[in-house]
Image: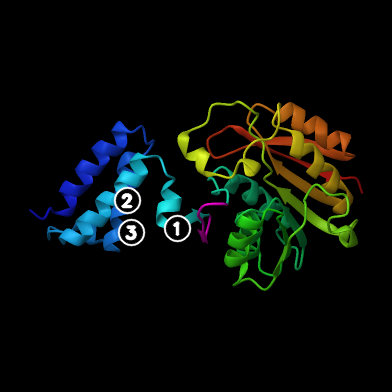
Amino acid sequence: MPAVPAVLLRTAERELAGAGVASPRQDAEALLDHVLGGTARFTLTAVPPEDSARYRDLVHRRVGREPLQHILGVAGFRRLTLAVGPGVFVPRPETESLVGWALSLLAGRSAPLVVDLCAGTGAIGLAVAAEHPGARVHAVELDGAALGWLRRNAAAWPEVSVVRVDATDPATLRELDGTVDLVLANPPYVPDGTPVPPEVDHDPAIAVWGGPDGLTTVRKVSVRAAALLRPGGWFGVEHDETRGAEARAILAAAGLVAARTHADLAGRPRFSTARRER
C-alpha cells in the first residue's frame, strides 16, 4: 500500500538511527526531499510506488554509511552548493570558520590575490570568490579525481584559476612568490590510526591522513605559503583539534609571525593563522 511522506520518514529515521547515523531525522528528510523535490514531504498525498522504492534504496545506502553528500551529489558550503562524489574530500562545516576569518581579513581590499592549497572540491577558494567579488584565486590540486570535481565546481568562476600541481612542491606557483595577499589550506591532517566515522572511508585517503602526528603536509604547505606571501600577507591552515600548539610552532618555524589558533563553529581549536613580517 502506498505510504504518505510522514510514514516513510518515520521508518527511515528509525533505520538510520539504528545504523548509528548522527542526524537520522535530518538525513531522512534530505533524502526524501531529493526524491520528491521541494516541500512535497509535508503533504498527506501518498508517495507513488516508484518514488517510495527509490527512497528506500537511498536510505539503504545511507544505512550503509555512504556519505549523505555522495548520495545527493552535492554538499553545501557557506553560500555554495558544490558537486561532490567518489574521489574528492567532502567539505566539512568546520572549514567555514577558516573562510570566515579569511573574508574578515580581506574586507576592504579591492582585488586581493589568494591561493587555496590542497583545494579538493574548491570549497575554500570558491567561497572566497563568491563572497569577496574581485578576489583573484588560484586553486591548487594534484590528485586527478579531485581535480575533476574542482574543475566542475570552478567552471562558473572565471576569476578562479585551477592549477594541477603539488601544493608541497617548492616550485609550485613560484612566479607568485612574494606577491600573494592570502594563502589558505585544508591539507590532510588526521593523525594516522585515529578512529573516524565510517563515512570517512569514502573520502580519498590522500585527503584525510596526515602522518603519525597529522602534521606532515601542514609542515610542507606552511613553508610553501611563507614563500608565496607578500610582506604583511597572511596564511591560514586547518589542522587537527589536538595540534594547535604544534601548528603555531610550525608557522613560526616557516618564518611567519603573530601565530594564533582559532576555534571552529563547535568551539574546537581548528585552524591557525600567521603573517609574513612586513
Residue assigned mark 1: 73
The vertical placement of 206 against 33, above or below, is above
Q: Which residues are magenta?
A: 78-87
- The span from disc 3 to disc 1 (Cα, nearest Å) is 10 Å
258, above or below 40, in the image: above
Task: Say if the magenta span includes residue 102.
Answer: no
Q: Tag 3's secondary structure?
A: helix
Residue 138 found in image quarter: bottom right
What is the C-alpha distance between the residues marked 2 and 1? Answer: 12 Å
**Mark closest to the chain's N terminus, 2 or 3:** 3
User: Label 3: few (<14), some or many (≥20) within 10 Å?
Assistant: some
For this view, does 76 lie left or right of residue 244?
left
Which callout, 3 or 1, points at the residue further toward the start of the chain?
Answer: 3
- N-term-proximal mark, 2 vs 1: 2
- Residue drawn where x is 75% and y is 39% of the image: 217
Magenta-drawn stretch, dominant element (helix, strand or loop): loop
Q: Position of residue 190 (x, y in %)?
A: 63, 33
Tell me which residue sits at (40%, 56%) in the image: 72
What is the distance, in whole Å, between disc 2 and disc 3 at their CAs? 10 Å
Q: Which mark is residue 34?
A: 3
Residue at 22 percent across and 60 percent down: it is: 51
Give the residue type that dot 2 points to. Answer: Leu
Relative placement, left or right, of 126 versus 4 is: right
Image marks 2 and 3: residues in contact by CB distance under 8 Å:
yes
The residue where tag 2 is placed is: 58
